[in-house]
Amino acid sequence: MPGSTLVRAPAPDPNKSVIENVLELTPLGTIGPLQAAGSLALTSLIYLCRELWHPPGARGVYGGAVIAQCLSAAQQTIPPPSASNDHAVFLIHSMHCYFVLAGDSTIPILYHVERVRDGKSFVTRTVQARQKGRCIFTTTLSFVKEGSAGEKTIDHAWELPADALAKLHEGTGEEKSYGDTDAEAYFVGTVVRVHNLWQFPAERRRRNSQDSSRKHERADMEEREPRNPVGIMVSLDHTIYFHRPREIKADEWLLSESEVPWAGDGRGLVLQRIWNKRGVLVASCVQEKRSWSFEWLKGRLALPAMGL
């Protein structure tokens, strides 16, 4: 549990999945209404009672969990279906996120949810995750009214790679899960894999890696010269487009395909497509990462306080 708490965390609900219990939030109240540019802006405070996972060797808490909790916090402020809104159901369709500071797993997180706009077809929210009064993460989310485009729409989606399911059934695919030390850096680490870089020295990789299925990969890496190894990588920003939110299940695997269209000036851009096990393209992601080489780190006495 966090070192200091505002309210006691509820007992885990056996009827919920592990990830649902991890991401459970507690509403604290609403500030406002405040008059802003001719409209009423309400800010809700939503509190994280449970301690977030801090991946071994990482600078802060797992960023994916903060993203998920911001989404959960925003969803708690979405108007429910009622006669006043024609029984509309609003579903998330996009998130634009910025990582500002490393999150501390020993300090409670307060999520400030601003009700930016409640429209007939779209609802907009901005969420700030705060610790000790400082913003560590911010995101703007947009929710769309289900079925608002009418019955006739233009439908198009990239298909699942032909050999993807076969590889997974053969056991050659890589499954990642919450709590897996490799999962946290897998998406942002695409730049490293594309350019055949080492994310840390070969000696550490040999000492820490116990997975016999990766012996071949380790041997290939050790044969290469350790040119320009990457010392640290952090995520700067992350955009998620939810194409089929109802097709995403927390207890089912998702298959992702990543590519790097550009890298330079200590930054890299990663594009990702995500399918569910039925072959439906459920989401697309764009992430920008920041990296520092070991040579750069050697000239510094301490790591930067911020991810920028």
Image: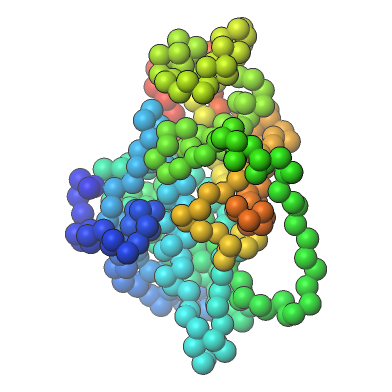
Up the image or down, 173 lies above or below 51; here it is above
Q: Position of residue 4 (x, y in %)?
A: 19, 50
* Residue 106 falls left or right of residue 122: left
List the single residue furthest toward the bottom: 83
Q: Position of residue 262 (x, y in %)?
A: 72, 33
Up the image or down, 23 lies above or below 161; here it is below
Q: Position of residue 28 (x, y in %)?
A: 29, 68
Residue located 60% across and 45% down the image: 255
Q: Quadrant of residue 102?
A: top left
Q: How is the image coloured?
A: rainbow
Residue located 63% across and 49% down the image: 274
Up the image or down, 294 lies above or below 1; here it is above
Q: Position of residue 29 (x, y in %)?
A: 31, 71
Residue located 39% across and 40% down the image: 179
List the single residue furthest toward the front: 170
Whether residue 296 appears in this view of the structure is no
Viewer-proximal residue, 23 or 206? 206
Q: How many marks?
A: 0
Residue located 47% across and 56% down the image: 250
Q: Quadrant of residue 95?
A: bottom right
* Residue 150 falls left or right of residue 211: right
Whether residue 22 appears in this view of the structure is yes
Viewer-proximal residue, 247 or 193? 247
Up the image or down, 83 lies above or below 203; here it is below
